[in-house]
Image: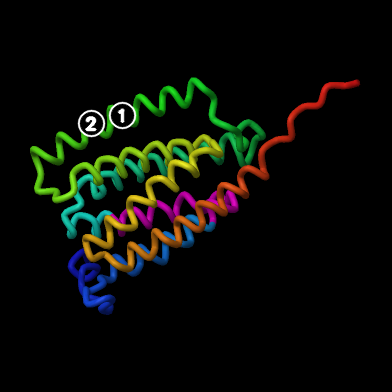
Amino acid sequence: MIDGLLTTAFTAFGAPTTWAELLGFATGVVNVWLLVRRHILNWPVGILNVVLLMVVFWSAGLYADAGLQIVYILLGLYGWWAWLSGGERHAGLTVRTTTTGEWTGLAVAGAVLTAALWLFLDRLTGSTVPLADAVTTALSLLATYGQTRKLVESWWLWIAADLIYIPLYGYKELWLTAILYVAFLTLCVLGLRTWRAALPAPATVPA
């Protein structure tokens, strides 16, 4: 099955595009579109998307991104459960802003993740882009966690990651995936605006 996914579907910009990359493109667009709309089906579609991208990234030597997809599956399952138990059936999980304490925790986690992944990729793997791979991995994990909690600023983390992913995938000649992340970037801006509009109105103090 994996061999079939790695066969060439068509050639783009002089480089072969596999079926895994093509299907990853399609499921990725659907996933982010559903996420912008805060639809619960974004989680199962997202899990399918990361399985496909795991195959693409591993075959391209982007080992941190490939390993990241396993964590995405776990976060996807958690997000699916959290939205069902706290957002869809109950009123407990709503779109909100990130607290100062959460930002502090995210910043520390991001710095530790980036440093650890950079050292691991640089010394123990054949990654040709260890720093970029580490930074995007850390940003993506933090953004995904933020979306499991419906933190509106998680979109900013995705925007930052996408701005690095686009030239990175172009460098790796994963042109369809690079185009996908241009679409992701556009959807992230839309998602930021949509989630901001969904924030609860501030309480008014009676005159």
Could you tell whether 37 is left or right of 168 in the image?
right
**Range of residues picked out in magenta:** 34-53
> What type of secondary structure mainly makes up the magenta span?
helix
Q: Image quadrant of residue 5?
A: bottom left
Neighbourhood count class around disc 1 (C-alpha, 10 Å): few under 14, some 14–19, many 20 upward = few
Query: What residue sits right under mark 2 in the picture?
Result: 115
In this rendering, the answer to whether 109 lies above or below 76 is above
Q: Are marks 2 and 1 in contact (CB under 8 Å)?
A: yes
* Closer-to-camera residue (13/137): 13
x 44%, y 48%: residue: 159
For the residues labelled 2 and 1, the Cα–Cα distance comes to 6 Å
Residue 13 x %, y %: 27, 76
In this rendering, the answer to whether 31 lies above or below 161 is below
Asked whether residue 109 appears in the rendered view, the answer is yes
x 44%, y 41%: residue: 157
x 47%, y 40%: residue: 79
Residue 62 x %, y %: 20, 52
Q: Is residue 114 one of those drawn in magenta?
A: no
Query: Hey, what amino acid is under mark 2?
Result: Ala
x 33%, y 50%: residue: 164
Query: Hey, what amino acid is under mark 1?
Result: Ala
Asked whether residue 81 appears in the rendered view, the answer is no
* Closer-to-camera residue (67/172): 172
Q: Is residue 38 one of those drawn in magenta?
A: yes
Residue 198 x %, y %: 67, 43
For label 1, the SS is helix
Could you tell whether 40 is left or right of 173 in the image?
right
For label 2, the SS is helix
Disc assigned to residue 111: 1
* Closer-to-camera residue (39/98): 98
In the rendered view of the protein, which quadrant contains the C terminus?
A: top right
Disc assigned to residue 124: none
